[in-house]
Image (spheres, grey):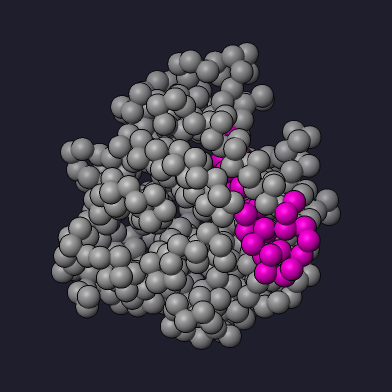
Amino acid sequence: MNQSITDLPPAASLDLGELGAFYRRHLERDVLPFWLGAPSDRVHGGVFTCIDNYTGARVSDDKFVWSQGRFAWLMAHAARLVRAGLLTGDADDLTARAVETVEFLRANAFLADGAVAYLLAADGRKLEFMPGKGHDLSYFADCFVALALSETARATGQWDYLDEAVATYERVGERLAAGTARSEPYPLPAGCRAHAEPMILLNVAQELELAMRQRGDPRSDALAASALAHMDAVLTKFVRPDGLVQEVICPAAASGAASSGRLLTSHVTPGHAIESMWFVMEEAARHGRDAAVEEAARVLLASFEAGWDPQHGGIFRYVGGDGRLPTGRAEGAFEELILATWDTKIWWPHSETLYGALLGHVLTGDARLRAVHDRTFDYVFATFPHPDEGVGEWVQIRDRLGAPLDRVVGLPVKDPYHLNRNLMLLVELLQGGSSARTTAA
């Protein structure tokens, strides 16, 4: 299949091999080169992500730490795919970029207590994203640094990085248990728990598990047990009987966030649920948990149907707990975000759906999951890729009608992670077989 983005046939007419070839070409030609170009900082290490969503022009030199961790993971993973023959590129250069980024983080991001800063200057100086709130704002930044260290260890064989990744992961767990872990800029009321917590811990633990197996580290079984425990927490504590994921659970007395009625505890984030479910499917398949694979596929289908816009196509960022438009009064910053951005069509839920649905289809044989992929594919490639091939990548933020939207819908960044990662995973799945993702990922 040699079609350009502008004349693609419907996805349903393409077999898995043709899809794999397309995704590889799109990654190699249209997406990855964007990030290997001007955004890469070959002086200090890392990547500039405060860049205009449409033109690609840099608007700030600030470096959000979780984007730096994500970039290092991407570079290291791409290097491993090149060495496996699944991508074309310079593995040594990709590895060098990963190492440069990890060394930038090791030198600058860590605080005295082992947590990591949220925001750095181009040269590594610590900045306050929220003046007066300090540097340790979000444990998610720590998690992405752990992922960076782990994947770079796998790409280089420098296993000290993996030991540091495990220590970072363990410190996050300790802070969560003690109630000291922060999740700015959208903190939860005291006593509430987010689906994002076991979800990100599952992802970090499963990556550490795989790195340890590659190393031959006897701790791999303990990390597998940790990953499976987080997986079970996602499925048993946050999946509702209707198959939708409750993003936040609060006791009735928690700062007025009663479990019934408040938008915080009733909204659904379809793309987040879909991403979470492919984490679950990979880990469950790796350990023979077939029932969990099937349950994750059920949740993915329900989340997609709840999130799909029947009028204009694409996946809503947020929907109400009944699958309808979110309504209610905002009682905090997170609820304000939901009401302000629910109808945006942003890149990452769509790229997560492309991979998650095809993974589910390959693992279960369920034709409905292939249909979810195909419906998403046809919308995505008519909507997101940048019309100017000289710029490349995607115009990541769109309005409900699919037009480019010059608006911040989270952090003020163009993020390299979801699209590059999911294209890499699709290439692995479709050209390397399901075992490439569930056994030796």
The one nearer the camera, 159 or 360, is 360
Viewer-nearest residue: 410 or 177 = 177
Task: Check residue 211 for magenta coloring.
Answer: yes
Tell whether position 111 is magenta: no
Residue 227: image x %, image y %?
65, 48
Where is residue 373 shown, x and y percent of the image?
A: 30, 53
Does 112 sit left or right of 154 as displayed? right
Residue at 59% x, 38% y is: 232
What's drawn in magenta, residue-wise? 194-222
Q: Is residue 392 visible?
A: no
For the N terminus, the quadrant is bottom left
Question: Which of the 4 image quadrants contains residue 87?
Answer: bottom left
Indicate the position of residue 401 as horizontal and vertical percent values: 22, 46
Closest to the observer: 63 or 211? 211
How many tags in the picture? 0
Q: Is residue 252 above or below residue 322?
A: above
Q: Main secondary structure of the magenta part?
A: helix
Taking 117 as reference, is 369 left or right? Answer: left
Residue 206's spot in the image, x, y percent? 62, 54
Tell which of 264 and 80 is nearer to you. 80
